[in-house]
Amino acid sequence: MILEAEELTKTFDGKYPQQVLKGINLQADKGESIAIMGKSGEGKSTLLHLFGALDVPTSGSLQVCGIPIVGTQDSSLRNEKIGFIFQFYNLLEDFTVLENVFMPARIARKLTEEVKQRGRMLLEEVGLSHKANHLAKHLSGGEKQRVAIARALLNSPELLLADEPTGNLDRQHSLEIQELLLKSAVAHGTTLIVVTHDEEFAQRCSRLLFLKDGRLYTPES
């Protein structure tokens, strides 16, 4: 089991506390691709942040690769077990493509020759080896998202989390990124959980869930 969540809740404090997630249960197996859909404001990004240990739940339990991550924001866990792909790429614009891909290993102080070779291989997989030394700011949106995918896969994560990865792209580039994400997850044996408004993309995943009123539902339920 790559991810196991039990009765996760999330309440944002303030003058008027708001409970966004009300009891999330999910098990994700190795190599599985799961799409999560729902209306804006339902808490999809919040849920993905919990899965990625970028935020902590108010209650409930969560494990990634058998490691409990409730109540902690362990950067080593995020670096070694989890890859992230965001809607707006989050690249360092004044760094080269290859430097962006290497960044997770550089942060972890594990930028070995073997890792560098893997980074170059991933760039080739996403079709951008010829732009390895170009600055990120000179890339198109679709190219930036390809770099983000290569970066997310650099440390061989067990879990790949993608938050609206095609939401900022035109239809042609959107389809290309969908294909690349699904193929990459299969090729690298990575569990993919993607938040998306694109129903066609969601239907291509091995499982589709809806987030509504703070809970996850299958289409049948």
Image (tube, helix red, strand yellow):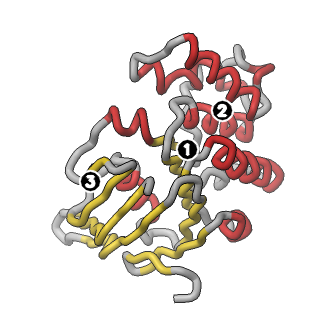
With respect to residue 14, does 125 lie above or below? above
Task: Identify the residue under disc 3.
Answer: 56
Q: Residue furthest right?
A: 172
Q: Residue furthest bottom?
A: 221
Residue at point 26% right, 71% down? 18
Of labels 1 and 2, earlier in sequence is 1
Q: Residue furthest left?
A: 15
Q: Depth check: 6 or 106 in front?
A: 6
Task: Identify the residue under disc 1.
Answer: 85
Amino acid type at circle 1 is Ile
Q: Secondary structure at mark 3?
A: loop
Residue 72 visible to the viewer: yes
**Gap between marks 3 and 1 measured at Cα:** 19 Å
| Spot occupied by residue 109 in the image (x, y as percentages of width and height) | 40, 16
The label on residue 147 is: 2
* Mark 2–mark 3 CB contact (< 8 Å): no
| Spot occupied by residue 218 in the image (x, y as percentages of width and height) | 53, 80
For the N terminus, the quadrant is: bottom left
Of labels 2 and 3, earlier in sequence is 3
Residue at point 43% right, 65% down? 27
Amino acid type at circle 2 is Val
Question: Which image quarter: residue 126?
Answer: top right
Residue at point 73% right, 46% down? 180
